[in-house]
Image: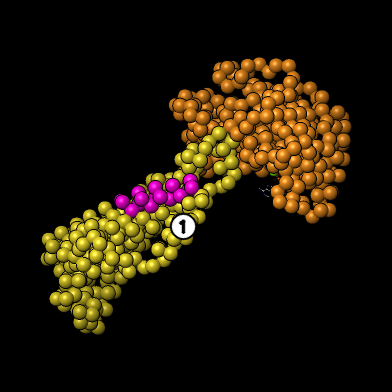
Amino acid sequence: MTDAADQLDQLLTVGEAPAARAKLQLNGVSRRFGAVQALAKVDLGIAEGEFVTLIGPSGCGKSTLFNIVAGLLEADTGGEVLLDGAATSLLGKVAFMPQRDLLLPWRNVLDNAILAAEVEGRPKRAARETARAMAADFGLKGFEDHYPQQLSGGMRQRVALMRTFMFDRDLMLLDEPFGALDALTRAMMQRWLLDIWSRYRRTILFITHDIDEAIFLGDRVVVMSARPGSIKLERRVELPRPRDPALLTTPAFNAIKRELLDAVEEESMKTFAAGAA
Amino acid sequence: MNAALARGLGGGVLLLVLWEAVVRLAAIPPWILPPPSGIVATTWSARGPLLDAGAMTLFEAVTGYGIGAVLGLVLAMLLALATPVRKLVLPMVVVVNSVPVAAYAPLALLWFGTGALSKVVMVAFIVGFTVFLNALDGLLRVDPAAVALLRSFGAGPLGVLWRLRLPTALPAIMVGMRVSTVRSMIVAIVTEMLGSQKGLGWTIFEAVLQIDFLRVWAAILVASLISLGCFAAVSALERRVVFWR
Ligand SMILES: Nc1ncnc2c1ncn2[C@@H]1O[C@H](COP(=O)(O)OP(=O)(O)OP(=O)(O)O)[C@@H](O)[C@H]1O
Ligand SMILES: [Mg+2]
């Protein structure tokens, strides 16, 4: 653990993660867009400090679910979304990283990273100092003054992640953060994210299309059904941490993978048959 | 950029040489098309009154431009925030804007007199519309996902306007402002032609009446140079403001 992380831990996180209580609880959350039923009665609980990966066929409503948890979309009446046990307004309470990095081209790396802090009204100077200290942990040292157009895809994602981490909220929603990266960069970023997560302890809900990624990262893998999306399967991943790439070829990993593959394939076939994939 | 500038200059010089040659070889009478050398000589000998007239027109154009650009931008920001009002106002704006500006010039002269005010008003009017329409388009053409991101951070409509819409719209706003520079000179000159005792438009009008075509061309030359200078200044500003493009 670096000194910077030690310092920032005090700056950024809200105390130690206590005994597992539900950080987020979804009860019967549905959402319809006109004739399209995107989500149908999603029930899902996430414990404090847990890393949950969410996997499901394209168009099953994963991003819709994220938008609801981030407070950007209303769920249809009947369901409830509880954050720390309370049904409050969610806007501004959850650190949300959308499917695209959405970096602002007129802001350099540091100023993109402090966007949320600025919106919150924190002084720019102090926020920039924090970001500068964090840059090394996010592999951006020496690039603080670069503009997004000058960065590689992997770096852009790290800036977007840094922006999400700097929006200091216990619950983080990451929508396919590595979806557009090549396999090598992606593997590197996965290990890096686990490392960062072990330092800046947060509760993470992570969308992916990649089963290996879902297992490698998660404490628990949640499989969604084809549209209308609901929770089809939950599988706890008991693999030890810190996790090593060698894990991907172990029998324990493969056993979990086989189990999940069956469920995911079945749902993907349904989507395919419906002509929506 | 420099190569483009050099090519532009080269093209200009070539055109002038050709023009001079054609006029001399074909012995075209000066009231149809005077040679460039004659225009330059007349401009030089009449530089005093021409500079006075140019200063007047430049003052009207710049003042109107400043007022119009600010009003257009402020109105666009207000309407970007207020969707219902925008849907009501925008069709009217488009209708008013679809009439050629010259048509409003007599009204401006009637209401604001033949002094500088009527020209300033006309220029502000055309610049205001151009900047307003460009700015509004830019302000509304934001990525909805980026708006959602800012809202998830707790930003309200003003926060979204300041941190996202305005920077996103800057390229469009600057295009509007660049196009407006030339228009502001044209409108100032046309309005002067229709009624005034000063300025390049009035100089042109007067020279036509006196059948002094070299002076017409000299005034056109001065107007072009001023236009070009304003255009270059705004283009330079654009490159600084929209540095990420
Ligand atoms: N704002 C909207 N208006 C209408 N329909 C929508 C809207 N947002 C999503 N949908 C529909 O809801 C369904 C779920 O979309 P969503 O984006 O949540 O899927 P997803 O699981 O994130 O897909 P992907 O894996 O491709 O990102 C889709 O059929 C989509 O067309
Ligand atoms: Mg999605």
Name the amino acid, label 1.
Leu
Q: Residue B170: horizontal and vertical position, in percent? A: 44, 48
Picture quadrant of residue A199: top right
Picture quadrant of residue A225: top right
* Chain in yellow in the render: B
Q: Is residue B144 above or below residue B193?
A: above
* Chain in orange in the render: A
Q: Quadrant of the N terminus of chain B?
A: bottom left
Q: Residue at x 80, y 37 (%)?
A: A231
Magenta residue span: B66-82
Q: Residue at x 83, y 31 (%)?
A: A235
Crowding at dot 1, Cα within 10 Å, few <14 / some 14-19 / many 20+, comes out as: few
Q: Is residue B245 above or below residue B105?
A: above
User: Is B74 in the magenta?
Assistant: yes
Total marks in image: 1
Picture quadrant of residue A164: top right
Q: Residue B155: horizontal and vertical position, in percent? A: 53, 36
The answer to which of B41 and A261 lies nearer the viewer is A261
Would residue A129 be seen by someone viewing this image from the given angle? yes
* Residue assigned mark 1: B90
Q: Residue at x 71, y 23 (%)?
A: A48
Q: Residue B96: horizontal and vertical position, in percent? A: 40, 63
What chain does badge 1 belong to? Answer: B
Q: Residue B44: horizontal and vertical position, in percent? A: 14, 64
Q: Residue at x 62, y 32 (%)?
A: A89
User: Is B198 in the magenta?
Assistant: no
Left or right position of A244 against A185:
right
The answer to which of B167 and B162 lies nearer the viewer is B162
Principal SS element in the magenta part? helix
Q: Is mark 1 within 8 Å of ligand 1?
A: no
